[in-house]
Image (tube, rainbow, N blue to C red):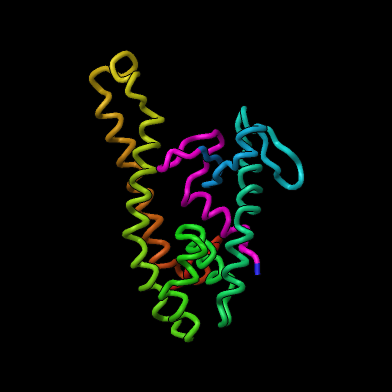
Amino acid sequence: MKMSENGRELLARWEGVRTQVYKDSAGLPTIGVGHLLTEGESHCGKIVIGGVAVAYDGGLSEAQVLALLGQDLTRFEDAVNSAVTVVLNQNQFDALVSFSFNVGVGAFEKSTLLRVLNQGRYNEVPDQLRRWIKAAQAAWRQFRDAHLASLFPAEDKVQAYGSVYGECVQRAARELTCERIEQLYRWVKGVPEGEVCAGSLPIQ
């Protein structure tokens, strides 16, 4: 199986799309949806996307970011296809690929989630996913802080914002947090059956 187009788009919204190179929480050069630049990509300034070498110095288009994500997801799709021994529908497969993308192939293959799933205990999988949310939240807070820092550089604090600097940062932080809560709620609770564009979300 392959991750659906809706699943990829949802994952991109969940993780955040960055069309310019930035430093991740470990200080590594990254672009797109969590694509770590290889030594070769950093040296030549190009990424091969769909068989074409694309210069990223001026940034990537959102279409190129999604195409790059599709390439990067291949190893996670292969991991799910290889490790899961029970039948999955498309929504379940998309959710597991997203999970593997976040925690890494090794952690996925060793997870209790995979063990209970392969025993056919589908109803226990949501609880296993919730266990990982706490760790994911810590990573998200790092992303949030980096995103806010890029929106409101400290060197612009006085000249550009003056006394409203703190208020602007807090407003942006609230908006990001509300969006995150909505995403988490949809991932954990699912959406009503029949909702248009449910993508890889679980169905209530």
- The residue sitting at 26% across, 17% down in the picture is 162
Q: Would residue 189 be found to the left or right of residue 68 on screen? A: left
Give the vertical position of 46 relative to 90 (above or below): above
Q: Is residue 58 visible?
A: yes
- The residue sitting at 62% across, 67% down in the picture is 78
Give the vertical position of 173 relative to 101 (above or below): above
Q: Position of residue 23 (x, y in %)?
A: 46, 36
Q: Would residue 124 be found to the left or right of residue 81 on screen? A: left
Pick the front one: 108 or 90: 108
- Residue most toward the right? 51
- Residue most toward the top? 159
Task: Read off the magenta span.
Answer: 2-28
Q: Position of residue 179 (x, y in %)?
A: 38, 48
Q: Quadrant of the C terminus?
A: bottom left
Count of all numbered marks drawn on residues in the image: 0
Q: Report which quarter residue 157 is drawn in.
A: top left
- The residue sitting at 48% across, 39% down in the picture is 28
Q: Quadrant of the N terminus?
A: bottom right
Is 172 part of what is drawn in magenta? no
Pick the front one: 104 or 94: 104
Q: Position of residue 32 (x, y in %)?
A: 56, 42
Is 7 part of what is drawn in magenta? yes
Q: Would residue 96 be found to the left or right of residue 47 on screen? A: left
Q: Is residue 195 visible?
A: no
Q: Position of residue 36 (x, y in %)?
A: 54, 44
Pick the front one: 103 or 125: 103
Give the vertical position of 198 relative to 162 (above or below): below
Q: Report which quarter residue 190 is drawn in.
A: bottom left
Pick the front one: 90 or 84: 84
